[in-house]
Amino acid sequence: MSEPAPQVVPPADNQQDEAPQGGQRFSVREIFRSDHPALVTILAIFAAVVIGSLLIVVSDEPTRAAASYFTAAPMDTLSAAWHAVSGAYVALFQGSILNPSSLSSGSLTTILGPISETIVSATPLILAGLSVTLAFRAGLFNIGAQGQILVAAIFAGYVGFSWHLPVVLHVIVAIIAGVVGGAIWAGIAGVLKAKTGAHEVITTIMLNYVALGLIQFLLSVHGFQAKPYTQAIATPVDGTARYPHLLGDSLRANTSFLIAIAATIGVAWLLRRSTFGFRVRAVGANQDAARTAGISISRVYIGVMLLVGALAGLAGSAQVLGTQPQVTADIDAGIGFDAITVALLGRGSASGTFWAGMLFGALRAGSVQLLASTSTPADLVQVLQALIVLFIAAPGLVRLIFRLRATDGGDSAVLAKGWNG
Amino acid sequence: MSAQTTDEELVVHLKKVQTGPSPKRRVGVGVALLLVGVFSALVLATTGSRRTATFGFNTGGALHIPDVTFPQAPFCVTVGVLIAVAGAYHAARGFTPRVLRAVGSVAGVLFLLSFLAWAGTGGRTVQLTSLLQQGLFLAAPLVLGAMGGILCERSGVINVAIEGQMLAGAFAGALLGTVGGLAAGIVGAVIVGGLMGLLLAVFAIKFLVNQVILGVVLNVLALGLTGFLFDAIMANDSNGTNNPGFFGPVKIPLLGDIPVVGPVIFNQNYIVYAMYVIVLVIDVALLRTRWGLRTRAVGEHPQAADTVGINVLRLRYQNVVMGGCVAGLAGALLTIGSVGAFNKNITSGQGFIALAAVIFGRWTPRGALGAALLFGFAGALQSVLSFLNTPLQINASLLGMLPYLVTIFAVAGLVGRVRAPAADGEPYVKGSS
């Protein structure tokens, strides 16, 4: 990947921070000299899009057909390739942000549809991403968001369909139940880590499978399973226990998005301003130093894991009380694992995680349109996500590709520890 | 601890340290064993629905072994008492760690037999040989995946990407196996696994990316890429691209006729035979050869290794790529080694289980082998039990949780604070410290 020249990317609006030095001798070179995270992020996304385009071209049937007579009519190949690539990215855009053809119809619902879908996909990603981010900051690696989401969905879903409470109260109680469920599940890993030193990577992975077994078991139990007892689906959640719609009843976006925003602010506050957040960061930065300074490592581990589980629990309740108001074995929808990439893209900050969740949510929403209107497989989105994070994790590579000059000490902060951390 | 120390108290103190776990943990483990024994003697012995259990031993060997029928309750009581006595002894006096491991393994096997005897009282025969055979078959990908992890991690590069390497290997095995025959499938799986390993190596060693993060991302990349290519290439033309066939079991002439052991170990497919060799080679090489010594040195203390002239980075590159190759072969087992077709996410988390086996087995080939076998047999047990009329109907999903719960308990109680190779996950930059 050495072709794209620097001048292709104009990230001017992200360079406000660098403005002062531009006063003396402003040049394109100066802009690209920095290791500004925003610059690296944008270049990483660009590089991922370029590689994604290559994938689309290679896998596109008409392009391959046209390539067989490339020497005779090279423009055919190029136009077929352009058609495939532009078609895919246009579909992603239309599915996630705006479909221009809806403008002519004029109804607000159809115009806002894609945005609504983006919000729906982004909300659980943001919440679970915050969960993984918080764990990272304490030096813990939470692979268990999947299990926490599943258990939260069991708790919230059960309260949602079997308790019959008044309107506002019901949804609140159901959310709390989900939060408690998630906290219990992550808390187990936290207690084991604190008390016995059991490595959280193993315990959270194992707890994922246990949660999956639990949900499969419950979905075969009468009373949890829905009435005809033919499908592994739970009874739908009561209307009173669902998140109210955000953009009108015909669009799926719901108020769990507001909770995601609140959680982002909460986690940012926690990490930056609170005493507990300071301890978390201290333990994450250097366990031994933190212990020497009198911080109880085991208490921090347990506390963090409870919070981590609570956040994943919110993601689970957003799923079961909003997006798909019915407990199924795949209610997690891969969010638990995508949350890890979201957190990595967010680089350990709450607001970064929020925007990373929005981006991945948009990609997810767009992938539906990709599947519907093009022949490009929807898994392209997953490849893009992985490539973006890969490039962002390796600023050195991005610099190499785009021929940027290195500045000292600008590399990404350590987010995850190794096995001995 | 210098040589001139004559202080006797210090010597006594050193001996104490070597006796192993704290009294609290010792009593805890002892009581746990005791409870398992009591469970077998009281619960399993009294709830069996008939008086006898039958174990079968045959899967078509030349020698016919008759089924063994025996009274179930006395058997469960005997086993329970044995385990309980061992547990009580450990709580009171304590075994040395080495003996405890042996006792624990024997107790585990005995308890399993006791459980099977209980499950087999429903009137159907418990086919032990096929249980073991299937267990080994299910364990094989985990064993190979774990070996890939060990090769990588002993030289100091964390390999969370086993899952992705396996998935890529499974895909390449199916695709190339269809296009160029099964042998090409194997070679392709190994090469593509190795390429995934190379990707891990370059990003971890050259670009100094945090290796845990990197592993997760590479897994997502492999999942996305194989899913993308599956839809783009295989989905429309599955006969021409995803129909490699598979290696059937090949019986080794004489060894395969040994009762019980023969059909279990010597009637498997070629990849499983390759697995035996790989495990043996890695175990011997890691502990007895110059390469092994260097690998361990680089994994524990790269600066020291560098000082004595070992090329740290080159060794890491080699080992990580080799690890990827082995994990790719593990992936081939899932496609051309068993079902003969690729499917999206066919690994379904087995790479992570292999990783757990690495950690569970304390980064040793033998330990990881044992852990992977445990997972494999637990999986086989689950499917065998669903055929039996157990006295109490156990839900299959709940049974499926068992291996994972066992792992959690084992990691929390028996293994305790595992210690990875000291430099595992630490990038090495020459002259940095």
Image (cartoon, helix red, strand yellow):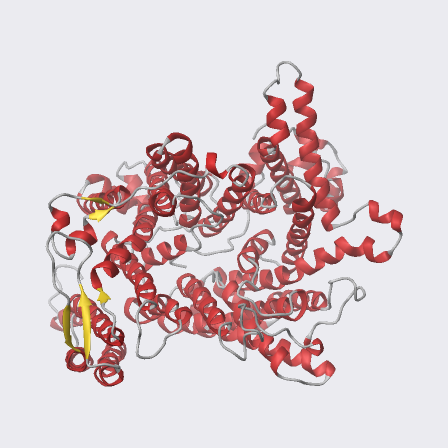
**Image location (x, y in percent) of residue B75:** 16, 78
Q: Is residue B243 above or below residue B417?
A: above
Left or right: B354 with respect to A372? Answer: left
**Residue depicted at 53% across the width and 36% down the height:** B233
Residue at image coords 33%, 42%? B326
Residue at 28% x, 37% y is B310
Rendering quarter of residue A348: bottom right
- Quadrant location of residue B394? bottom left
Q: Please say if B347 is above or below B336.
A: below
Q: Position of residue B121 (x, y in %)?
A: 24, 76
Q: Nearer the viewer, residue B238 or A384?
A: B238
Residue nearer the viewer, B399 or A301: B399
Residue A421 in which image quadrant: bottom left
Give x and y (percent) for residue A283. Answer: 48, 65
Task: Tell which residue pokes out farthest to the front in this image.
Answer: B123
State whether residue A197 appears in this view.
Answer: no
Q: Is residue B306 left or right of residue A298?
A: left
- The answer to whether residue A391 of the structure is visible from this angle is yes
